Image: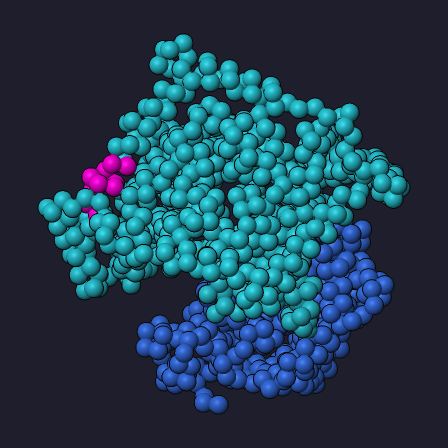
Chain colours: A blue, B cyan
């Protein structure tokens, strides 16, 4: 693999990453999705285009000289079990192409992808199909629902393809529909549902096959802002319960902050920075990333847990204020401003997950003002 | 419409190839221009008769040879005759099955079916319609037509759907198939009959084959289009769940393409219906034969009875096939109007089931007992009344009170001031080399070198076939009919696009007109306009009007609302908005309307050869009437196809030119 000048390696997860909602150290986990040196080049001269890219040429230069479009440019990352990895980029940055390459809906030009221990690049059609049936699922931007099938048959589609008997798959589909709050809608057709409900069907369809890895391709961008907010909250709640490995694509920085354990900022096909929300906010790699951080209403969107540090050896005192893992930073601000003591972030059962320190929060908010 | 070539950097960037003038194009344009000049200077007039390809004789010889060897040659004994016998047996078998059921089964089931798909009123009308066919003693002919139709549609679908799937799967195959289908759809139905008469003679089997081929294109095309238009995310979702290609095709693609495939089935059925009727010319039998015989005798009453029976059948078949297409969609619509289509109440559905079950039981008993002929006491002919009306119309409408107002003077006016001068101009006023030169220039401007050259060759071929004057006659009639149609249709379309109420008012009328098979339209027209070139032109007008109004309306309605509002906000009057904003934006769609009108008019003008339309149509009609005229008819048929091709490509080229440059 030729090393590009722009290549940015994934930060060592053991440094600071606390996988959100679990409090466990990321380093302890196996990577479920591994991608290294991934390229997608549209056009007839991919080798020439890649060489030019390695010399530091940008997209326009490469397109002018070779006629090729470099959609994904030497991307490398790992996603660990139970982690939510968000790829954030504006339209045309290659993020949708990236997720399609990782799931091999389209063929990458160069690179290595591994999902649940299967190397995708040389997987046969049968092996790939098997992997898709048992290990992965995707939720699409425009839902990709089947208008000729009832909601329950949409949700049961993955099971039907696997050859699960009718009664069994319907039973499972109705269970999942209950999980996403759609009982009673099973016998409707998707078009009869609102946009938000349709995407719940999309989500249920993906969950029905019990995948280890879930790919989300801008799932909420076609929805109204209020509905989008609801869906994000619901996804967070579901993730706390289900603990899937998630690769989530979005163009909305606030959405990325809300959902991510780690964020990759993508521009012109390459990752410009990969890090936890805290890292992105406090140490933006360049002006491009900084521009995003300055626009984001950080205190409102960032969950308290995203800035917390591991409890470690610290003795948690009973008198310290507490907050929940899904609460926003804003809700913890009064406690942080009043006294010099950390706020304890707890899960639903009241167990401490981590500590929120005044300095960290101050650093993030200061960064935001700059 | 003056800005045919969009100027500016955007246009040149989006289509550099077509705008660049190749040296060859310049040479061709110069040559064409020289032809025009030389033609006028030398004033050579019509195409010289001595230059003749002489295709008629060998074809007539082939025809004679085929007739003589029909019983002996292996081509017939081994291949064609067994096929003919098989097809004929199939039709006969279906006819026998249809006859086995007692007569009352048909009105009851048609009524129930239409009730189910369209509501009570449609059901009642359907029932009455079917009874009316029986009352006018056309029951047996109706079965003959229906059996031929049934076999033809079945074969078209059996061949067409797999062809559509193959075209979707294989782009190279689609690349060959699509232009073929285009060419097939530009050919007037009438012309299809000639080669099959040549090969098989007169009878039901050549009629069947011509019908199958004529009716094939829509179902092939719409299957292909339907499969291609299945949204990408749906297919991706299916693949993402690990579906095999076959599973995706069966569970996702075909169900998603179902509405398109059923729409294709509807169009195929309607084309088959119109062709089966026209095929009466080569002995398809059935209702078409009755219309044809009555028309030859100018017995408008008889022709009307058979014609109305055909229209009833066509409408019932159309509503049924369309109803099936929309039935599955019912209740799946968007949430806002989920129940708009489902006018049927549960009580209705239950009633329909009960009546259907009871009738089926009675029918079985009736079929076994053998009491199945349409009862004679129910018979009632309205032909005499129609004849009375016709006679009255001739006496009173042809020239109302000798005032110079009426259908006669109108017909004279069109003949004297429009058709005849234009025909003179085209056939001898413009010298033939100049005509070819103008054709080449038109093609060059509309699309480019290939079309220019193609038109030049096609026009020369028409002359070489010895069909120059007849073609110019047909062209003149076509152009007059197109002009008259557009003059009426475009204002109607504009009005329909502006007023939903007006659209709702004319929609059912146009819908009805569109369902009438072309041939049957001639019946009322000859009542009012006698025979000659004018009935053909008037019938063309009626035949082409629905499509023209529809496309005008559609084009104007596609103008985005914001553009509309922007124009209004600058203080444009309604007329200014129409002229400066809506019409230019709708221009490509309007050109499609022109294209459709030309193709429909041409098809009708050719059929009008039967009622004295002259031109190429008459030669074709003769070919189907007399076996010694097949050669000449064949030549005329080729000329029609060439003429249709020229007009089609030319108008489509202009339509493409009018399209604004696509977004980068």
Asked whether B173 or B608 is in front, the reply is B608
Q: Is residue A286 visible from the viewing direction of this image?
A: no
**Rendered residue at 28%/32% (across/down):** B420
Q: Is residue B327 visible from the viewing direction of this image?
A: yes
Indicate yes or no whether the magenta region holds residue B427.
yes
Asked whether B49 or A370 is in front, the reply is B49
Asked whether B123 or A172 is in front, the reply is B123
Indicate yes or no whether the magenta region holds residue B304.
no
**Rendered residue at 48%/77% (across/down):** A40
Q: Is residue B568 left or right of residue A289?
A: left
**Rendered residue at 45%/88% (across/down):** A3
- Look at the magenta stretch and give its main secondary structure: helix
Q: Position of residue B499 (x, y in %)?
A: 49, 29
Q: Position of residue A209 (x, y in %)?
A: 75, 70
Q: Is residue A349 above or below residue A128?
A: above
Q: Is residue B162 left or right of residue B66?
A: right
Q: Is residue B642 left or right of residue B274?
A: left
Q: Residue furthest left?
A: B41
Q: Is residue A21 above or below residue B364?
A: below
**Rendered residue at 12%/50% (across/down):** B38
Q: Position of residue B108 (x, y in %)?
A: 78, 35
Asked whether B458 or A246 is in front, the reply is B458
Q: Is residue B569 left or right of residue A314?
A: left
- Count of marks placed on residues: 0
The magenta-colored residue range is B423-432
Q: Is residue A109 above or below residue B330?
A: below
């Amino acid at each position: 693999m030729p090393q590009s000048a722009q290549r940015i390696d994934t930060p060592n997860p053991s440094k600071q990453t606390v996988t959100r909602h679990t409090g466990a150290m990321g380093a302890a986990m196996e990577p479920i999705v591994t991608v290294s040196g991934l390229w997608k080049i549209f056009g007839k001269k991919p080798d020439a285009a890649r060489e030019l890219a390695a010399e530091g040429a940008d997209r326009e230069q490469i397109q002018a000289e070779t006629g090729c479009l470099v959609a994904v440019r030497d991307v490398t990352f790992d996603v660990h079990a139970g982690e939510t990895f968000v790829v954030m980029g504006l339209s045309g940055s290659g993020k949708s192409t990236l997720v399609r390459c990782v799931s091999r809906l389209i063929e990458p030009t160069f690179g290595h992808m591994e999902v649940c221990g299967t190397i995708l690049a040389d997987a046969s059609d049968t092996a790939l199909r098997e992997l898709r049936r048992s290990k992965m699922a995707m939720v699409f931007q425009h839902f990709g629902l089947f208008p000729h099938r009832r909601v329950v048959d949409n949700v049961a589609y993955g099971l039907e393809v696997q050859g699960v008997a009718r009664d069994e798959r319907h039973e499972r589909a109705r269970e999942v529909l209950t999980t996403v709050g759609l009982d009673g809608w099973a016998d409707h057709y998707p078009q009869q549902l609102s946009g938000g409900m349709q995407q719940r069907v999309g989500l249920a369809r993906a969950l029905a096959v019990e995948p280890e890895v879930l790919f989300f391709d801008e799932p909420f961008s076609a929805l109204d802002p209020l509905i989008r907010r609801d869906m994000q909250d619901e996804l967070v709640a579901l993730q706390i319960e289900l603990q899937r490995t998630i690769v989530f694509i979005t163009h909305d920085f606030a959405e990325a902050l809300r959902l991510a354990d780690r964020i990759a900022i993508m521009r012109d096909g390459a990752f410009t920075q990969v890090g936890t929300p805290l890292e992105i906010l406090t140490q933006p790699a360049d002006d491009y990333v900084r521009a995003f951080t300055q626009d984001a209403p950080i205190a409102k969107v960032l969950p308290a847990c995203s800035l917390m540090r591991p409890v470690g050896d610290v003795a948690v005192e009973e008198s310290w204020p507490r907050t929940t893992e899904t609460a926003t930073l804003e809700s913890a601000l009064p406690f942080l401003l009043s006294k010099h003591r950390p706020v304890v972030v707890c899960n639903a059962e009241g167990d401490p997950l981590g500590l929120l320190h005044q300095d960290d929060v101050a650093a993030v908010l200061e960064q935001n003002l700059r | 419409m003056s800005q045919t070539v969009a100027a500016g950097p955007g246009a040149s960037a989006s289509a550099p190839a077509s705008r660049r003038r190749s040296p060859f194009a310049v040479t061709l344009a110069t040559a064409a221009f020289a032809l025009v000049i030389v033609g006028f200077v030398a004033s050579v007039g019509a195409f010289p008769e001595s230059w003749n390809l002489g295709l008629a004789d060998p074809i007539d010889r082939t025809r004679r040879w085929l007739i003589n060897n029909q019983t002996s040659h292996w081509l017939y004994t081994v291949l064609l005759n067994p096929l003919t016998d098989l097809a004929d047996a199939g039709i006969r078998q279906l006819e026998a099955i249809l006859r086995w059921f007692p007569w009352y089964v048909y009105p009851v089931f048609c009524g129930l079916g239409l009730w189910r798909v369209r509501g009570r009123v449609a059901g009642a009308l359907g029932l009455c319609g079917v009874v009316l066919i029986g009352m006018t003693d056309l029951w047996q002919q109706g079965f003959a037509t229906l059996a031929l139709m049934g076999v033809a549609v079945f074969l078209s679908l059996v061949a067409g759907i797999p062809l559509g799937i193959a075209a979707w799967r294989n782009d190279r195959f689609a690349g060959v198939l699509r232009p073929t289908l285009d060419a097939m759809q530009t050919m007037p139905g009438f012309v299809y009959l000639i080669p099959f008469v040549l090969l098989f003679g007169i009878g039901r089997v050549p009629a069947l084959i011509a019908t199958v081929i004529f009716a094939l294109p829509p179902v092939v095309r719409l299957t292909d289009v339907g499969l291609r238009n299945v949204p990408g995310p749906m297919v991706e979702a299916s693949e993402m769940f690990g579906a095999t290609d076959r599973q995706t095709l069966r569970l996702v693609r075909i169900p998603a393409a179902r509405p398109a495939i059923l729409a294709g089935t509807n169009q195929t059925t309607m084309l088959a219906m119109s062709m089966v009727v026209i095929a009466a010319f080569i002995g398809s039998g059935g209702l078409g034969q009755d219309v044809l015989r009555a028309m030859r005798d100018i017995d408008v009453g008889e022709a009307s009875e058979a014609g109305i029976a055909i229209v009833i059948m066509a409408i019932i078949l159309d509503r049924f096939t369309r109803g099936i297409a929309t039935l599955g969609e019912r209740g799946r619509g968007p949430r806002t109007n989920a129940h708009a289509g489902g006018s049927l109440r549960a009580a209705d559905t239950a009633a329909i089931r009960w009546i259907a079950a009871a009738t089926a039981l009675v029918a079985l008993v009736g079929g076994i007992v053998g009491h199945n002929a349409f009862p004679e006491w129910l018979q009632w002919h309205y032909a005499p009344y129609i004849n009375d009306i016709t006679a009255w119309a001739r006496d009173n409408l042809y020239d109302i009170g000798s005032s110079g107002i009426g259908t006669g003077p109108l017909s004279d006016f069109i003949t004297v001031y429009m058709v005849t001068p234009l025909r003179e101009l085209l056939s001898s006023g413009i010298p033939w080399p100049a005509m070819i030169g103008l054709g080449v220039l038109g093609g060059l401007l509309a699309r480019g070198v290939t079309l220019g050259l193609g038109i030049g060759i096609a026009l020369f071929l028409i002359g070489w076939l010895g069909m120059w004057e007849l073609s110019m006659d047909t062209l003149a009639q076509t152009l007059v009919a197109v002009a008259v149609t557009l003059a009426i249709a475009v204002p109607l379309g504009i009005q329909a696009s502006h007023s939903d109420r007006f659209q709702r008012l004319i929609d059912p009328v146009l819908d009805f007109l569109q369902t009438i098979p072309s041939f049957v339209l001639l019946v009322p027209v000859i009542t009012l306009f006698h025979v000659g070139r004018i009935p053909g032109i008037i019938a063309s007008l009626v035949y082409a009007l629905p499509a023209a109004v529809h496309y005008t309306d559609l084009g104007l309605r596609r103008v985005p609302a914001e553009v509309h509002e922007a124009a209004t906000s600058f203080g444009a009057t309604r007329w200014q908005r129409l002229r400066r904003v809506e019409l230019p934006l709708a221009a490509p769609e309007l050109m499609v309307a022109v294209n459709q009108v030309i193709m429909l008019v041409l098809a009708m003008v050719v059929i009008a050869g039967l009622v004295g339309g002259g031109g190429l149509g008459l030669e074709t009609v003769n070919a189907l009437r007399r076996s010694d005229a097949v050669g000449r008819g064949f030549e005329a048929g080729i000329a029609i196809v060439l003429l249709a091709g020229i007009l089609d490509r030319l108008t489509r080229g202009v339509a493409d030119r009018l399209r604004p440059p696509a977004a980068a």
